[in-house]
Amino acid sequence: MARLTNPQVSLITTDGFAGYELIDSGVGRKLERFGDIVVDRPEPQALWQRATSDQRWDNAHAVFASNDDEEKGKWRLLRDVPEQWPVPVGPATMLCRLASFRHLGLFPEQMPHWDWMVRRIKDIKAKKSEPVRVLNLFAYTGAASLIAAAAGAEVTHVDASKKAVTWAKENQAASSLQGTKVRWILDDAKKFTGREVRRGRQYDIILVDPPKFGRGPNNETWDLFDSIGPMLTDCRALLAEDPAALVMTVYAIRASTIAFAQLVNEALEGRGGNLDFGELAIEEREGGRLVPTSLFARWFSGMTTD
Ligand SMILES: C[S@@+](CC[C@H](N)C(=O)[O-])C[C@H]1O[C@@H](n2cnc3c(N)ncnc32)[C@H](O)[C@@H]1O
């Protein structure tokens, strides 16, 4: 029976990067800077008091106003905001927008995973002569795809939303990374992995960042709790011989990190290596308090934990 050999919960945090900072949080909201634009968004887990002045919050460019449901609501502009604006994210330039469900097209808490992925691309490059292949499932606007491609990997980017894939291609152009190798796939992630298993395809690194509920282009249903187990079985079949790596992140759900760690551990039973699991959080640039965002489990066939 697969058993967690190192049941230690990790906390991975970022205090932002040139294009992003968490300025303050509290009373169910967070104040963040994406490039030149400051936004005030709902954050139900920010149970504490705000640390900065009301004036700082009042100076935000846009506020996502919502009642009970943190995702349903509308952006209210307090200052001019362009339709889209550039946000530097490592080697990529992400075009951010005030999008539905309080999103902006970028999940900055993922930055430590993207850095980790680049280190794994280097490790794998050092051991294999063929190009490193990265499969990015639920790839959204493509930050991870572009960062992997900039690091020299051949990337397969899969998302069910035409709008998201178009946006990701625009981000590739904005990043001047058109020359890099990204295969854009508009498909249901489950169908795609099933097909790739039947074709005997292999990937050195797999990223899985699924929503709680989603729909494929032909209305296929994605339900995290029903679908993630079979998908990880596919991922196991798709993972290349060592060295190989897998990163899974889940968010906006009621669950423990232990549940997902145990699932990944079971799916990869017998492959050895190192499984790290826990929570991702963003650290306020000034106040240092942590805003939790998601759960993760990540595995590398080597023993490195860096
Ligand atoms: C919030 S995003 C993941 C974030 C992304 N990995 C990042 O870091 O930028 C979730 C994505 O899953 C996609 N999605 C939802 N259901 C899907 C399905 N059945 N197959 C493929 N993609 C799906 C959505 O279109 C959305 O782009």
Image (cartoon, rainbow, N blue to C red):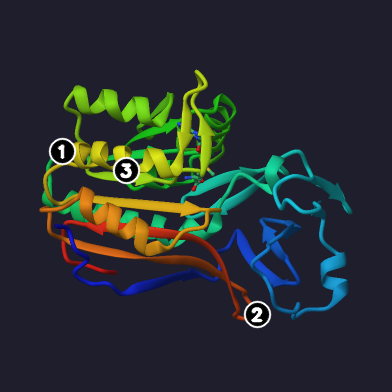
In the depicted view, which residue is nearer to us: 264 or 61?
264
- The residue pinned by badge 1 equals 130
Give the residue at x 49% y 26%. 216
Q: Neighbour class for label 2 at 10 Å: few (<14), some, many (≥20)?
A: few
How many residues crowd mark 3 within 10 Å: few (<14), some (14–19), many (20+)?
some
What amino acid is found at the position of numbered circle 3 in the picture?
Gly
Q: In terms of secondary structure, where does tag 3 sit?
A: helix
Looking at the image, tell me whether mark 1 or mark 3 is earlier in sequence order: 1
Residue that numbered label 2 is attached to: 286
Q: Nearer the viewer, mark 2 or mark 3?
A: 3
Q: Residue at image x 69%, y 44%?
A: 101
| Residue beneath disc 3 | 229
Q: Position of residue 161 (x, y in %)?
A: 54, 28
Q: Nearer the viewer, residue 122 or 206?
A: 206
Please tell me which residue lies in front, 110 or 209. 209
Label 2, secondary structure: give it. loop
Q: Are marks 1 and 2 in contact (CB under 8 Å)?
A: no
- Picture quadrant where residue 174 is located: top right
Quarter of the figure that contains the N terminus: bottom left
Front in this rendered view, residue 132 or 204: 204
Residue 153 visible in image = no
User: For the residue carrying disc 1, how many other residues have a C-alpha within 10 Å: few (<14), some (14-19), or many (20+)?
Assistant: few
Determine whether 157 is above or below 187 in the image: below
Q: CA distance from mark 1 to mark 3?
A: 30 Å
Query: Between disc 2 and disc 3, whose residue precedes?
Result: 3
Name the kind of residue labelled 2 in the image: Glu
| Marked residue nearer the N-terminal end (1 or 2) | 1
| Image x and y of residue 120, in percent | 26, 55
Give how far apart the Cα atoms at labels 2 and 3 are. Answer: 40 Å
Residue 188 % position (x, y): 43, 26
Q: Secondary structure at mark 1?
A: loop
Q: Residue at x 38, y 45 (%)?
A: 208
